[in-house]
Amino acid sequence: EGDAKDLPAKREYVDGWQIKTDQVWYMAEKPFHVKAEGTMPYEHFVVDLGLTEDRWVKAVECRPGARSVVHHILVFLQEPGVIYAGMPGDLVAAYAPGFPPVSVPDRMAIRMKKGSKVIFQMHYTADGREHEDRSFFGVQYTEPENVDYRVYVTNAINFTFTIPANTDDFPVSATRKINKDCLLLGMNPHMHQRGKAYTFEAIYPDGKKELLLD
């Protein structure tokens, strides 16, 4: 174990919001019924944010309503006039068990344009009892003069593979080309129950490779 005096301070868990919220949106006006058994397809709920001006977001937090059956929440932002290919929009908030709220560094923020909507993607996992869920997310704003850089989420994702029966260690790859200079703030592999290893690698224009996460 080592010397007990070298242990970090015991973590304190917050009952409620972990960020200061300036605005909160629920996925729907009425709760969604989660059945007791079986596999459920992803559910999607569209919410108009009601923004009358562009806002810049410094921190964001998703919170599940029925915690025991919410496997994940993904909140996708749809700005007016933008056509999104592949994904429902720009990912602005996410939750899975143990996933912390996101606070971006100083002079950075996430943009939410006036007239924008969000799509809540809800993944439920039945636990043997019926539940009513009304999950939600909240944001903390900052003023435009405090922002030098826009933060956004991109992805390298593969929807088209099939794992053959009785096969171990089946490799799947995905790529994302970055067309402009940027600062990578973080990475979040997500594979549900079948994934067991994950590697992120950066390949630079000159052919150099750098291992980012393994």
Image: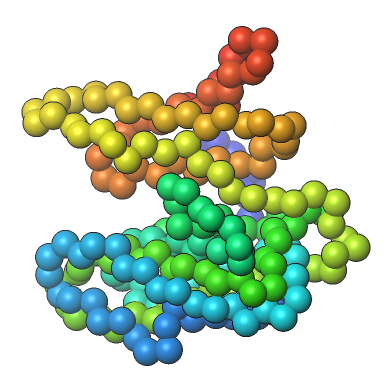
Residue 177 vs 124, above or below: the answer is above
- Numbered marks: total: 0
Q: Identify which residue is drawn at 78% across, 53% down.
A: 108
Q: Residue furthest bottom?
A: 30
Q: Does residue 126 appear to the left or right of 151 in the view shown?
A: left
**Is residue 174 in view?**
yes
**For the view shown, which residue lies furthest in the left direction?**
166
Q: Is residue 57 left or right of residue 68?
A: right
Q: Residue furthest top?
A: 207
Q: Is residue 213 visible?
A: no
Residue drawn at (12%, 70%) of the image: 37
Q: Residue at x 51, y 41 (%)?
A: 155
Observer-nearest of 7 and 181: 181
On the image, the x and y values in percent for residue 152 come to 64, 50
Residue placed most toward the observer, 88 or 131 = 88
Residue in view at x 57 percent, y 29 percent: 177
Would residue 33 be found to the left or right of residue 207 on screen?
Answer: left
Question: Residue 124, position in %: x, y?
Answer: 28, 66
Q: Position of residue 32 (x, y in %)?
A: 31, 81
**Quadrant of the rendered structure where residue 135 is?**
bottom left
The answer to whether 210 is drawn above or below residue 16 in the figure is above
Residue 27 figure quarter: bottom left
Q: Splitting the image into 4 quarters, where does residue 159 fall?
A: top left
Q: Residue 1: x percent and y percent?
A: 49, 37
**In the image, is residue 87 above or below residue 72?**
above
Rendered image coloring scheme? rainbow
